[in-house]
Image (tube, rainbow, N blue to C red):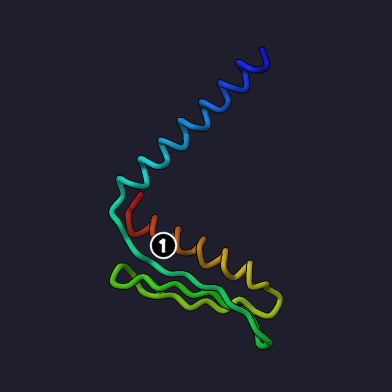
Amino acid sequence: MTSNKNFCIIEQIINKQKAFYSFITNMLARAVYTDGSGGPLGAGAGIYFGNLAEDQSIPLGKNVTVFQAETYAIQQCVYTEINISNW
């Protein structure tokens, strides 16, 4: 019984991955670049959209790690992409 249950769970995961892949490949291809960085004066995030939207430079202050700045840049990029696409 456990083996069958595990198979069903794996099958569900594979189906979700296939649906996600299909969604991504059906979107218009867009190249955007994100970056997060930090130093003694603080951290920041940047996003380059090319001709899709206005580029963003976001100061994040001194109490933010580089990892947080990187992930924030990616998050803001996704939000902007969604707004551009009117989803």
Q: Is residue 36 left or right of residue 39?
A: left
Residue depicted at x 39% and y 55%: 82
Above-or-below relation of 40 to 55 = below
Q: Is residue 7 left or right of residue 32?
A: right
Q: Mark 1 points at which residue?
A: 80
Residue depicted at x 68% and y 16%: 2
Residue depicted at x 40% and y 36%: 19
Above-or-below relation of 6 to 62 = above
Above-or-below relation of 24 to 36 = above
**Quarter of the view holding residue 77:** bottom left
Q: In this view, does 42 lie to the left or right of 8?
A: right
- Name the quadrant of the N terminus: top right
Q: Nearer the viewer, residue 9 or 40?
A: 9
Residue depicted at x 38% and y 59%: 81
**Quarter of the view holding residue 60:** bottom right
Q: Which of 75 and 5 is in front in this view?
A: 5
Marker count (numbered): 1
Q: Where is residue 72 in the image (x, y as percent from the top left)?
A: 56, 65
Above-or-below relation of 42 to 24 = below
- The residue sitting at the top extreme is 1
Q: Which of 30 and 2 is in front in this view?
A: 2
Element type at marker 1? Answer: helix
